[in-house]
Image (spheres, rainbow, N blue to C red):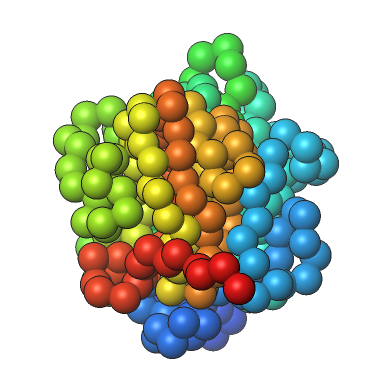
């Protein structure tokens, strides 16, 4: 493949792709989409149609595994992986559990949509950086990354979170309009300090920001301490998805434990949270939870 084929030609590319200028979906709680997460109105592996105000928990190990998966327009010689599709939207936004085989290697390039990745097991080289267990990266559309290579003898499993229809452009350069200031190449979450949750329902918990958007939304880890009891139900005026990494939390009668997934549409009423042993969870939300009225306790009266 010659240099003329893999170097980025901005004039030609801008004629065929305007992906960096596509507005994000307006959030169904009234937000303007500035967080570029597209968590509104999703379908899930257990609900093929969007159900408003109805939270969903399920075990991701029960979701059928799709073999022969590869990002669209990756070169033909790149090894296929597999995925379990957990939640998606017609806009192309989705969240999956992706497994990449040991022989995986891919050239440098950029994605045509924002991508967040969180490593569940294994290790992968992405250009100059390595991502290992609980490593995180946020790759804005148009930012060149790679080459990619799985490290060691173990396949890599990743939470793969796309913000829209994702294609891969094999190129040596960034798109000229790419948001390089938002790029998080490789973040080792184990090195981050724990901080406050900033919500009254989780005072017995700690939080590590992985990414915080301008509008206060973002992605974080939350550690719920043993003997936690939220005491009341809560109303959540935002969209949320979560993944249990260790331990558990009982939400009503459902035990949210390792490898289980949560999708909570805006204005859902979530049952009381309790745990004896504690747990660790990855959380994504599309609104600033420190603002009054975004999440609040709710104790319905008997009728």
Asked whether 157 or 257 is in front, the reply is: 257
Q: Position of residue 216 (x, y in %)?
A: 27, 68
**Residue 259 to residue 208: above or below:** above
User: Can the viewer see residue 245 in this picture?
Assistant: no
The C terminus lies in which quarter of the figure? Answer: bottom right
Depth check, front residue: 171 or 28: 28
Nearer-the-camera pick, 63 or 14: 63
Total of numbered circles in the picture? 0
- Please give left or right for residue 226 compared with residue 148 in the image: left
Asked whether residue 49 appears in the rendered view, the answer is yes
Residue 217, compared with residue 22, is above or below; it is above
Q: Point out residue 46 in the picture as x, y percentages from the top left corner.
A: 77, 55
For image coordinates 50% across by 68% down, the residue present is: 300
Location of residue 234 in the rendering, given as x and y in whole percent from the top left corner:
44, 62
Seen at 51% across and 74% down, the residue is 267
**Left or right: 52 as drawn, with respect to 203:** right
- As drawn, the residue found furthest toward the top would be 153
Can you tell which quarter of the image residue 211 is in?
A: bottom left
- Which one is nearer the viewer's eye here, 169 or 121? 121
| Residue 269 shown left or right of residue 33 in the figure | right
The image quarter containing residue 235 is bottom left
- In the image, residue 266 above or below residue 6: below
Question: Residue drawn 75% across and 54% down?
Answer: 45
Residue 278 location, x and y as percent? 40, 29
Q: Give the residue drawn at x 38%, y 48%.
A: 230
């Amino acid at each position: 493949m010659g240099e003329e084929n893999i170097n980025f030609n901005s004039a030609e590319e801008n004629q065929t792709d305007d992906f960096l200028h596509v507005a994000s979906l307006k959030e169904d709680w009234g937000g303007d989409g500035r967080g570029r997460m597209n968590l509104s109105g999703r379908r899930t592996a257990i609900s093929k149609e969007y159900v408003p105000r109805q939270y969903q928990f399920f075990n991701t190990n029960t979701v059928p595994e799709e073999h022969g998966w590869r990002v669209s327009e990756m070169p033909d010689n790149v090894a296929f992986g597999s995925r379990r599709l957990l939640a998606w939207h017609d806009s192309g936004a989705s969240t999956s559990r992706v497994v990449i085989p040991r022989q995986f290697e891919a050239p440098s390039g950029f994605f045509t949509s924002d991508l967040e990745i969180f490593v569940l097991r294994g290790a992968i080289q992405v250009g100059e950086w390595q991502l290992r267990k609980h490593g995180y990266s946020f790759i804005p559309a148009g930012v060149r990354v790679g080459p990619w290579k799985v490290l060691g003898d173990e396949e890599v499993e990743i939470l793969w979170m796309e913000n829209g229809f994702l294609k891969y452009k094999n190129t040596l350069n960034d798109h000229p309009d790419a948001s390089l200031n938002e790029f998080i190449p490789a973040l080792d979450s184990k090195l981050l300090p724990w901080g406050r949750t900033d919500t009254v329902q989780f005072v017995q918990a700690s939080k590590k920001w992985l990414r915080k958007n301008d509008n206060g939304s973002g992605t974080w880890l939350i550690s719920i301490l043993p003997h936690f009891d939220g005491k009341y139900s809560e109303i959540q005026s935002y969209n949320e998805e979560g993944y249990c990494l260790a331990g558990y939390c009982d939400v009503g009668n459902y035990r949210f434990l390792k490898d289980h997934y949560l999708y909570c549409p805006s204005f859902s009423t979530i049952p009381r949270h309790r745990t004896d042993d504690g747990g660790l969870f990855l959380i994504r939300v599309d609104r600033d939870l420190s603002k009054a009225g975004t999440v609040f306790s709710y104790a319905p009266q008997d009728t």
